[in-house]
Amino acid sequence: MPSTLSNLLYILLLAAGFPAGLILAKLCKEEIKIWKKRLKIISIISLILAITIYFTTFELKIPIIITLIFIIITSMTIIWKSNK
């Protein structure tokens, strides 16, 4: 049962990336124009790190991957919202 609860919390954390990106996109309109390329680079690096960490074996693998996916979701939401 604790595994199910932690999985639910991970899903809620990932789902929170979308509203966080929307809020940041609304608050930082001028900065997004400058940081758009950097946000894409951060997303790509996070994806590469998540894939690399997935194939390694150590204790805190899943929380780190969830954190990197949260960064990807937030960054992509900011970029997506800035294009509208």
Image (cartoon, grey):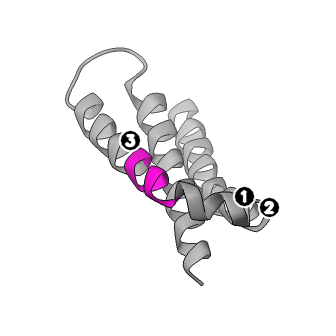
Q: Which of marks 1 and 3 is nearer the N terminus?
A: 1
Three-letter residue code for mark 3: Ser
Residue 50 as seen in the image, left or right of residue 67: left
Query: Which residue is drawn at the image coordinates 70% and 56% (left, top)?
Result: 20
Dot 3 corresponds to which residue?
46
Q: What stretch is highlighted in magenta?
A: 36-42
* Outermost residue, right side: 27
Identify the mark at residue 27; answer none if there is no mark: 2
Q: Name the residue under label 1.
A: 24
Residue 61 position in % (x across, y down): 38, 25
Q: Distance between the residues labelled 1 and 3?
A: 19 Å
Q: Which part of the image, by quadrant, shows the N terminus? A: top right
Q: Which residue is drawn at 45% across and 47% down?
A: 69
Q: In this view, does 33 lie to the left or right of 48?
A: right
Between the C-alphas of marks 2 and 1, the distance is: 5 Å
Q: Quadrant of residue 10?
A: top right
